[in-house]
Structures are given as structure tokens and as C-alpha cells.
């Protein structure tokens, strides 16, 4: 089931989508194997579906584009990493312990330095397990972390002590309304790329703009797309390193078993299988998962910022201030105009 913690926004919810035209309900049922009795239920063993382009043209023709978009978003979300809990959440912190060569190397220090300059308060969008939010709070800043995954938020909240001025809320970065303003905002580690359409990206940046004080700063981190990985049939980018949880002794391994690319929408969908093993090396569980991201080109981002009222202060290719470089990272530092 989708998490029941309310969202702090006017986000599309499952029930909302199910109120859409009948064919959307039928399509949703047919493609995803859910039971439609007013609630969504995962069918055990169901493997899910891929990209929005899988949605038959007939549906798009028969109903409104919005309706088809709703359906595709639900399908995505049902299978999306982080949103359904499991190994992607349980092993997030051990697997993303940032070392040398990691795309986020140096990011915590970078965000703390940027945020300190402003004095806070800080809003961390797509905050996940609080990997950045907690160090910001420990640096004495007032922090709000927002994420749409109740599972990631559970981990984040477990880290908070009485000394930390940090709050975690559930919401969608493309639609939130917190009714207050911040001096510094960030979207770390490619979380922005979970927004799968230009409309969602634009909506997110508009919300960021609305929540910043005049002159407030915003940092967002994306990968810079490597074109050889952006066409159908291109190889899987990486095998991910296994992780070991020192507390439980369990290890997790990830195999990327399928990769679908859609250059038209600039999205890819990877199917992952997580294998969790006990300390004796026996397999405890194998969990399928899907990661869907949208890649965005550097100039596309620059125009998006211009369109939504930001002035670009800097764009780096890492967290050490290196100049833009093809195929590396995009680390944008922008200011509210
Ligand atoms: C790769 S994790 C990054 C977490 C954290 N920012 C970090 O640097 O470790 C991506 C996070 O974005 C969240 N996310 C994805 N789409 C979102 C959305 N539309 N609104 C809010 N959070 C979202 C996921 O739930 C997940 O926690």
C-alpha cells in the first residue's frame, strides 16, 4: 500500500486518480495488476510496468492527456525506489556512505558552508534519510526536511535528538506549500531527477522560488547526462557496490537487470534486484525495484532557472568548485531574483 501519512501539499493521491475516467481505472488495473476496490493493493509477485510510453495511444486518444499522465505516475510510483520501503531504504545510509569518487563526495561540507553563509532557516527537499539535513542541524541551523517517502522519513526522524532544531515533513517537492520562507534551500543527490516531466520540474522551481526570501540561495545537484547512455539499447551504467549493515551483519547486493531508455521524454527506467544476505552468507530475500529518473541538460537547467525567477551564481561539476564538465555532475548555485 502507498504510505498513509498525509502529504503537505495538494498532490495527486491514489484515490484522486481513481476518481478519474473509467478507462483510466481499467488501464491501471490491466497494466499494473492492482485490485480496484477503492484502494490500491499490490498483487504479490507482480513485476510492474515500465515507462509512460507503454501507455497505449488509444488511452491517450480516448481520454485527456492528464488522465493518462495520472495513470503513468501511479504506475511509476508503485514501483519506485524509496517509496515502497525495503532494501533501498534500509540500506541507503550504508550504501551511500560517501567516499572518494562518489558523485556526492564533499557535498555535506559544501551544503553546510553554503547554508551557514545565509544563517538559515534551511529547507532540504527530497531529504531522504537526513544525510544532509542532520549535519546542517548539527551545525546549529534550523532545518526542515521534506520527502515524499514515509520510509525514508522514518529513518531520518530516528536520528533526531532534543538538541536538533530539525523537522521532517512528508510532501512532494513539485507541489508543497509550507506557508513560510527560508534563506537557503537545497535538493541534494539527484532527487530533482525524480521529477519526470518539464512541467513537474518547473512547478518545483516555482515552489522553491515562493519559499525563498528575496536574495535567498538554492543549490541543486543533478548528473550531467552522458550521451552514450541515453539511447535505447545502451549499456547499464554501473554495477553498484554491495553494502553491509554493521548492526545486523546483513549485506545487500544490487543487480541492474533491465534498463529502458526514452530519449523523447529524457527518462530511463532501471529494474533492480536487491539480494539481502545474512551474516552466514545465506540469501534472506530478493526484492525487485525500479528506479526512474529524468536527465536534464545543462542549458535546459539554465533556461529553467531564468524562466522561474532565479539568477545563476555558479555551476560546478563537483563539490570542490571545479568548472562545468561534460558527463560529470551539475551543481547549481542560484539566487532568487
Ligand atoms: C537519492 S535520494 C536523495 C536523498 C538525500 N537528498 C540525500 O542526498 O541523501 C532521493 C530522494 O528523493 C525523494 N523524492 C523523490 N521524488 C520526490 C518528490 N517528488 N518529492 C519529494 N521527495 C522526493 C525520494 O523519496 C528519496 O528520498
Image (tube, rainbow, N blue to C red):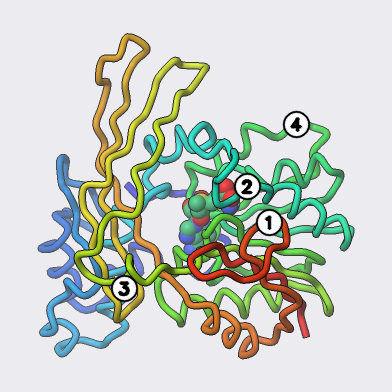
Q: Earlier in the sequence, mark 4 or mark 1?
A: 4
Is the residue indicated by label 3 positioned so its CB lies within 8 Å of ligand 1?
no
Labels 1, 3: front one: 1
How far apart, in angstroms, are the residues tagged by discs 2 and 1? 7 Å
Q: Are marks 3 and 4 in contact (CB under 8 Å)?
A: no
Q: Nearer the viewer, residue 2 or 309?
A: 309
Find residue 117 and report its horizontal and vertical position in percent: 88, 60
The answer to whether residue 322 is above or below residue 137 is below
Q: Are marks 1 and 3 in contact (CB under 8 Å)?
A: no
Find residue 192 and report its horizontal and vertical position in percent: 52, 65
Q: Earlier in the sequence, mark 2 or mark 4?
A: 2
Find residue 112 and report its horizontal and vertical position in percent: 79, 51
Labels 4, 1: front one: 1
Query: Mark 1 highlights which residue?
Result: 319
How far apart, in angstroms, are the residues tagged by discs 3 and 4? 39 Å
Q: Are marks 4 and 1 in contact (CB under 8 Å)?
A: no
Q: Are marks 2 and 1 in contact (CB under 8 Å)?
A: yes
Query: Mark 4 highlights which residue?
Result: 161
- Neighbourhood count class around disc 3 (C-alpha, 10 Å): few under 14, some 14–19, many 20 upward: many
In the figure, is residue 65 to the left or right of 195?
A: left
- Neighbourhood count class around disc 4 (C-alpha, 10 Å): few under 14, some 14–19, many 20 upward: few
Secondary-structure class at tag 3? helix
Q: Earlier in the sequence, mark 3 or mark 4?
A: 3
How far apart, in angstroms, are the residues tagged by discs 2 and 4? 26 Å
Q: Earlier in the sequence, mark 1 or mark 3?
A: 3
The answer to whether residue 140 is above or below residue 296 is above
Identify the mark at residue 70; answer none if there is no mark: 3
Identify the mark at residue 105; answer none if there is no mark: 2
Secondary-structure class at tag 4? loop
Q: Earlier in the sequence, mark 2 or mark 1?
A: 2
Secondary-structure class at tag 2? loop
Amino acid at each position: 500500500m502507498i504510505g498513509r501519512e498525509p502529504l503537505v501539499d495538494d498532490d495527486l493521491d491514489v484515490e484522486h486518480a481513481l476518481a478519474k475516467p473509467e478507462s483510466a481505472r481499467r488501464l491501471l488495473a490491466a497494466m499494473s495488476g492492482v485490485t480496484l476496490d477503492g484502494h490500491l493493493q499490490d498483487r504479490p509477485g507482480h513485476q510492474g510496468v515500465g515507462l509512460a510510453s507503454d501507455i497505449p495511444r488509444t488511452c491517450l486518444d480516448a481520454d485527456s492527456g492528464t488522465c493518462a499522465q495520472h495513470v503513468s505516475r501511479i504506475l511509476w510510483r508503485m514501483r519506485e525506489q524509496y517509496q515502497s520501503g525495503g532494501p533501498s531504504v534500509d540500506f541507503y545510509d550504508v550504501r551511500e556512505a560517501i567516499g572518494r569518487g562518489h558523485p556526492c563526495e564533499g557535498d555535506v561540507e559544501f551544503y553546510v558552508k553554503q547554508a551557514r553563509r545565509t544563517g538559515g532557516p534551511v529547507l532540504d527537499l527530497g531529504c531522504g534519510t537526513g544525510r544532509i539535513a542532520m549535519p546542517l542541524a548539527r551545525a546549529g541551523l534550523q532545518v526542515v526536511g521534506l520527502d515524499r517517502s514515509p520510509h525514508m522519513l522514518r529513518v531520518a526522524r530516528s536520528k533526531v535528538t532534543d538538541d536538533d532544531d530539525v523537522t521532517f515533513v512528508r510532501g512532494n517537492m513539485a507541489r508543497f506549500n509550507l506557508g513560510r520562507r527560508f534563506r537557503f534551500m537545497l535538493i541534494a543527490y539527484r532527487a530533482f531527477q525524480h521529477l519526470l516531466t518539464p512541467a513537474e520540474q518547473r512547478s518545483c522551481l516555482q515552489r522553491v522560488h515562493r519559499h525563498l526570501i528575496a536574495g535567498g540561495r538554492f543549490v541543486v545537484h543533478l548528473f550531467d547526462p552522458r550521451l552514450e547512455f541515453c539511447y535505447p539499447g545502451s549499456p547499464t551504467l554501473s554495477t553498484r557496490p554491495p553494502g553491509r549493515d554493521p548492526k545486523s551483519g546483513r549485506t545487500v547486493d544490487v543487480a541492474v537487470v533491465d534498463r529502458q531508455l526514452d530519449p523523447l521524454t529524457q527518462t530511463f527506467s532501471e529494474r533492480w534486484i536487491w539480494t539481502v544476505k545474512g551474516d552466514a552468507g545465506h540469501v534472506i530475500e530478493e526484492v525487485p525495484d525500479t528506479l526512474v529518473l529524468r536527465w536534464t541538460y545543462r542549458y535546459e537547467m539554465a533556461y529553467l532557472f531564468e524562466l522561474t525567477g532565479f539568477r545563476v551564481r555558479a555551476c560546478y561539476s563537483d563539490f570542490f568548485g571545479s568548472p562545468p564538465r561534460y558527463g560529470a555532475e551539475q551543481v547549481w548555485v542560484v539566487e532568487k531574483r
